Image (spheres, helix red, strand yellow):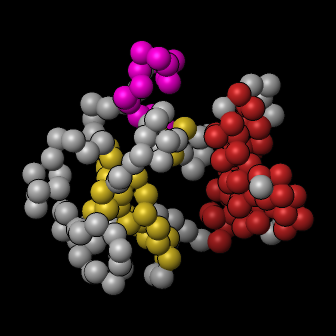
Amino acid sequence: QHSGYCGGTEDVFNVRVLMGPNVWYWSERLLRADNHAAPGWPSAADTNSWRYVGVTHEAYIHPTKTMGNELFIQYVGDTDSAVHAGMPAEVAGSFYISHDAEKSHEQSQRRLRQDVRLLEGYLNRPDAREDRWQYARAIFYLAQSHRSIGHLDIAKDLWERYL
């Protein structure tokens, strides 16, 4: 345990992810090793485990905690109180993840085109609408990817579909 926070009860911790010198977000990146879901999740027999969902921009979710708004996620790694005003106190010292901050424009565009292919592939599956949460998430990220590529009309149509 550290400062009374990192005990055996937390399932997931948020870490600050840097996308560039002035761009960052919180993301679930530290996960307990014993809380991953079995195949067939979620099922009536397995309502207390987590899994990744999404073909890209994956999220780590719990069938009731995440979807039912019952989740308190620890925020770790920041000692600068101005950065996380209103967030819980830091618990593990100062650290962060640097994500895509060093990519060239062409590398970023290549990744965005890959995301579009993955997301369109998922959305074109016959069973894509069965998981409403993941379906909506895929539409949102497809719109974001098209916007970043410069396909603004496509992005607008997708955002309207998402909303």
How many marks overall? 0
Which residue, as the protein is rendered here, is positioned at the far top?
A: 45
Of the pair 21 and 141, the residue shown nearer to us: 141
Q: Position of residue 33 (x, y in %)?
A: 27, 35
Residue 114: tell me if it is visible.
Answer: no
Q: Quadrant of residue 51?
A: top left
Q: Position of residue 56 (x, y in %)?
A: 60, 46
Is residue 108 toward the left or the right of residue 1 in the image?
A: right
Q: Residue at x 28, y 66 (%)?
A: 88
Does residue 101 lie above or below 32 as drawn? Answer: below
Instruction: Check the picture and name the quadrant holding the C terminus.
Output: bottom right
Does residue 55 lie above or below 145 as drawn? Answer: above
Asked if the stretch drawn in magenta spans residue 42, the answer is yes
Of the pair 119 and 1, the residue shown nearer to us: 1
Q: Quadrant of residue 76?
A: bottom left
Residue 90: tell me if it is visible.
Answer: yes
Is residue 11 toward the left or the right of residue 151 in the image?
A: left
User: What are the residue bounds of the magenta stretch?
Assistant: 39-52
Of the pair 159 and 17, the residue shown nearer to us: 159
Asked if the stretch drawn in magenta spans residue 159, the answer is no
Please identify the dominant SS of the magenta region. loop
Q: Residue at x 28, y 72 (%)?
A: 78
Q: Position of residue 161 (x, y in %)?
A: 83, 52
Is residue 11 toward the left or the right of residue 118 in the image?
A: left
Q: Residue at x 55, y 68 (%)?
A: 103
Is residue 106 toward the left or the right of residue 89 in the image?
A: right
Q: Position of residue 45 (x, y in %)?
A: 42, 15
